[in-house]
Image (spheres, rainbow, N blue to C red):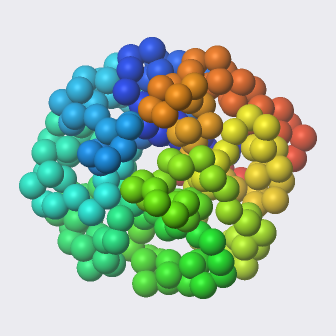
Amino acid sequence: MRPDIKICGLKTPEAVDRAVERGATHIGFIFFAKSTRNIEPDIAGMLADRVRGRTKIVAVTVDADADDLDEIIALLRPDILQFHGHESPERLLTVKAMTGLPIMKAFSIREPDDLRRIEPYIGIADRFLFDAKPPIGSDLPGGNGVTFDWSLLRSLDESVNYMLSGGLNKDNIADALSETGARGIDISSGVESAPGIKDLQMMDDFFAAVAEASRRAPVSGSVK
């Protein structure tokens, strides 16, 4: 069965439309000023309205304060909140109680100990996202186009619901799915012709590669 597919860092109507036409189960809008994929909440809301109800809309933030998060939620009306910073379990509990929205918590992975950091968030985060640790000198917590050792995920309990991210593209997605059995995948730079610029042909090629990989090596079930 094909995994959930999240196309992240969308900024144009054409990219949003193509992602959903090709079957993206999730689309992500990034609210982080240092990112080339940063977008204003009102513009993201207009883009989301094009496909609302046809895909899950994800708001991606990095240590956003309460006022910024309130504005994003009001203007985007996301289905899921993704946190890619240093948010504590207590912070996420507070946000869940106030918004009633599902939460995805991202973690950067390089070594086995990095996976142990998810333990306090189990039962709080509705889903995890595992990305590669950023290269030295990068200001971005994700979207750097680098992979990590996927074999590290073999130690996870099967009940851990996660999306795989970090350096995925049409050429390595079959290996990634075969190695991890991931039930969800997240891609941004792997379908870009330049930082922050989504390439429609690259998106088409990626979806085709996922479909082919899923036929040859089905992943371990679907998730909500």
In the displayed structure image, the side of residue 187 where residue 149 appears, left or right: right
Pick the residue in front: 30 or 162.
30
Residue 30, image x and y in percent? 35, 43
- Image quarter in which the N terminus is found: top right
From what the image shows, is residue 71 above or below residue 67? above
From what the image shows, is residue 81 above or below residue 93? above
Observer able to see residue 123: yes
Answer with the quarter of the image where residue 4 lies: top right
Name the residue located 18 percent from the left edge and 53 percent from the top edge: 69
Answer with the quarter of the image where residue 215 lies: top right
Pick the residue in front: 57 or 36.
36
In the displayed structure image, the side of residue 149 where residue 44 appears, left or right: left
Residue sitting farthest toward the left: 67
Residue 68, image x and y in percent? 15, 51
Residue sitting farthest toward the right: 216
Observer able to see residue 45: no
How many numbered marks does the figure carry? 0
Name the residue located 36 percent from the left edge and 44 percent from the top edge: 35
Answer with the quarter of the image where residue 116 lies: bottom right
Pick the residue in front: 21 or 144.
144
In the displayed structure image, the side of residue 175 where residue 78 appears, left or right: left
In the displayed structure image, the side of residue 174 where residue 135 appears, left or right: left
Name the residue located 47 percent from the left edge and 26 percent from the top edge: 197
Name the residue located 62 percent from the left edge and 37 percent from the top edge: 190
Residue 129, image x and y in percent? 52, 60
Residue 134, image x and y in percent? 52, 60
